[in-house]
Image (cartoon, helix red, strand yellow):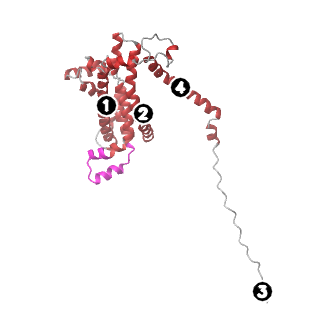
Amino acid sequence: MTALIQPPTQTPVSAPPQKPAAPRRHRSFRALEPTRMGVVVRWIWLSLAGILSFFPFYAMIVLSLKPGMVVDLPGSLIPWTDISFESYEQVLGGQNILGWLFNTLVYSLVSVVAVLFLSALAGYAFAKKRFRGKEVMFWSFLAMVMVPFHVTLIPTFILMANLGGIDTYWGLILPTLANAQAVFLMRQFIQGLPDELFEAARIDGAGEFRIFLRIVLPLCKPILATLGIFVFLWHWNDFLWPLIIAKSNSMFTLTVGISSLQQQNVPLSTMLAGSVVALLPIFLAYLIAQRYVQEGVTGTGIKG
């Protein structure tokens, strides 16, 4: 009986592993990519827009350094001729600009702290608390945005006059604390915070005010910085209400005080020097909080 000899089975040789092919970009996405010429044109337009935006500040600074000189454009905008700091010496020495600066700082900083604290409290209540009439109350409060400030100006002034707030700091600050935009932004931001954090804090025995101080405020740093910059700029540049509520020169803010220089036949360079002094604090404030402003705007846009 002959044995059948079978040929040995050959194990198949596995092919070497191949690198995964790079995903092909969709044709529509490739069509959206800018060409090299498009990038160049975009940078040219952005550079021109930046120059046009910076030009008024450049002209203000250069002309403030040339006192007693007839403005002759474009020759007066050359920065290295006839430079003098006489206008700044007159502003800081002869005028009451330091007092105006102090009034503006008090008006802006106290208002920022009060508006942020009150709007954060209201935003937390509207976002995470349940109570009867919450939606009606919120949208009624938000409807204040559609009411122009000039409509309520006379009733507010009469109320402050009856309360004795004319020519006082609290009369200057109090009517500006109810900020509907700030409450809306805080509510939109706090709504995106996870409810599990608040439930865990309540299980640990934390009260509502402690939750607000220890959890809500630290997590709201980006939006608080963003609102702080906006509220600070609004109060720093506010003109109408400080003009109405302040009766004496010692209670003027920078905007009202610099405007009053026009009635004193002050040279143009001196007024521009005062404007530069008024510009520096808000410019420094934005540089300090720039990162928080970008995070706050981005976070609010995503969570809202």
Q: Where is mark 3, residue-wise? A: 3
Q: Is residue 186 magenta?
A: no
What amino acid is labelled 1 in the image? Leu
| Residue 65 on image: x %, y % | 43, 18
Q: Can the viewer see residue 68 in this picture?
A: yes
What amino acid is labelled 2 in the image? Leu
At 34% across and 26% down in the image, what residue appears? Answer: 235
Q: Where is mark 2, residue-wise? A: 287
At 26% across and 48% down in the image, what residue appears? Answer: 207
| Residue 293 on image: x %, y % | 42, 36
**Label 3 near label 2: C-beta < 8 Å?**
no
Mark 4–mark 1 Cα distance, whole angstroms, equals 32 Å
**Label 2 near label 4: C-beta < 8 Å?**
no
Other-residue count near label 2 (Cα within 10 Å), few / some / many at <14 / 14–19 / ≥20: few
Mark 2–mark 3 Cα distance, whole angstroms, equals 93 Å
Location of residue 13 (image quadrant): bottom right
At 20% across and 21% down in the image, what residue appears? Answer: 162
Mark 4–mark 2 Cα distance, whole angstroms, equals 20 Å
Location of residue 289 (image quadrant): top left
Which segment is the magenta one? 191-214
User: Depth-wise, is mark 2 or mark 1 nearer the camera?
Assistant: 2
What amino acid is labelled 4 in the image? Ala
Mark 3–mark 1 Cα distance, whole angstroms, equals 104 Å
Mark 2–mark 1 Cα distance, whole angstroms, equals 17 Å
Q: Can the viewer see residue 154 in this picture?
A: no
Other-residue count near label 4 (Cα within 10 Å), few / some / many at <14 / 14–19 / ≥20: few
Q: Where is mark 4, residue-wise? A: 49
The residue tagged with tag 1: helix, strand or loop?
Answer: helix
